Amino acid sequence: MSPKKPDADVPPSLLLVDKPGGMTSHDVVARARRVLSVRKVGHAGTLDPMATGLLVLGVGAATRLLGHLSGSDKTYDATVRLGQTTVTDDREGDVTATASAAAVTDEAVRATLAGQVGPLQQVPSSVSAVKVDGRRSYDRVRAGEEFELAARSVTVHSIDVHRVTRPTADLVDVDVTVRCSTGTYIRAIARDVGAALGVGGHLVALRRTSSGPFATDAARPVEEAAGALSAAGAGPGVLGLTEAARAVFPARELTAEEAVALGYGQRVPATGAPGLHAAIAPDGRLVALVEDAGPLAKVVVGFPAG
C-alpha cells in the first residue's frame, strides 16, 4: 500500500460517486481513501448495500460541508413489490409473510401510493441505522432484542408511478420515482403501502438519482472520481471546494478586507438573506460559510487558507 499523503497534498473536494450495489457507504469511503492515499474522507447520506446511485464524498476540508449537505432533499427510483413481507422491508431479508396481490387493482396501487405523499410520521425499518439507546437498530435486531422504533417526521414531496407489472399471478411490482426530505426510508413506504393494501410489501430495487443540487448524471465510479482528483486535482465526478459550495449555497462575495476579517473569525456586514451563505474571497477561495446575526454575518464553518 502506498504511504499516506498529508491531506494538504490533495485539493479539498467533493466526489460525486455512482455507488454500485453490494457495497456499503463505508466501503466506498474506504476505497476512495485507498485511491487517494489520504484518511480524511467522509460521506453525506448513507445508502444501503442493496441501493445504487449518488453518494457524495467529501475529501479534506470539504468534509466540513457534508453535515450541511446531508439535509438536502433526495430523489430515488425504486421498485416496490406487493404480496410479500420481509424482515428488512427489502429484498435482502427473509420473507416473513405472503399474501396474494392478484385482486389488487392498478388504481388501488396508485391511490395507496398517493396516500404516502405529504408530511408523514414514518417508522423506520428495525434493521435501519437509527440509533436506539446509543446502539444501531440493526445491531439490536441481530442480538435478538425486541423493540419498537419511534416514528419520525418526514415529507414525501411526490411519488410518480411509471409502471405496474405482475411478475407472477400473486405479485405486483410498481416502478416509482420518489422525491422526499432527508431521513425518508423508501423501504418503509413499500412496507406501509403493502400493509395498507393488506398484502404486504417490500423494496426490490433502489437507486438514488439526486441529492440537493447534485445528480447521478455527473457521478462516476469511485475509482474514476478519486483517481481524477489524485492525478489532476479535477476531472469527472470532482467538484472543487468553492465550486461545491456555490452549488449548494448562495454566494456572499467578499472584499479583500472582509476575507481577512473572516479568516480571523471576525464578523462582516450581513448578507441580508436568511440561511447559510458561501463567503468567497476575491481570488475565488471559499473562506467560510456565514450566517446573519443581526446587522453582521458570523462564521459558521471556516476554511483556513492553505
Image (cartoon, helix red, strand yellow):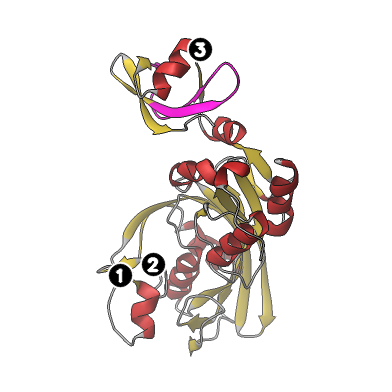
Q: Which residue is mark 3?
A: 256
What amino acid type should be assigned to the residue bearing mark 3?
Ala
Looking at the image, which residue sits at the far front? 3
Q: Position of residue 18 (x, y in %)?
A: 67, 57
Image mark for residue 149: 1
Label 3 – label 1 distance at C-alpha: 51 Å
| Alpha carbon distance from label 3 to label 2 | 48 Å
Residue drawn at (28%, 17%) of the image: 294
Instruction: Spot the residue most to the left.
Output: 133
Residues marked 2 and 1 touching at CB (< 8 Å): yes
Crowdedness of circle 2 by 10 Å Cα count: few (<14), some, many (20+)? many
Q: Residue at x 63, y 48 (%)?
A: 15
Residue 63 at x, y = what percent?
Answer: 50, 46
Q: Where does the image place residue 228, in percent across and percent down from the top left?
A: 74, 48
Instruction: Tell me the quarter of the image containing the C terminus.
Output: top right
**Residue kind at label 1, given as amino acid type:** Leu
Q: Earlier in the sequence, mark 2 or mark 1?
A: 2
Q: Is residue 97 visible?
A: yes
Residue on which the image places disc 2: 124
The N terminus: image quadrant: bottom right
Front in this rendered view, residue 130 or 278: 278
For the residue labelled by badge 2, is the local secondary structure a helix, a strand or a loop? Answer: loop
* Stretch in magenta: 269-290
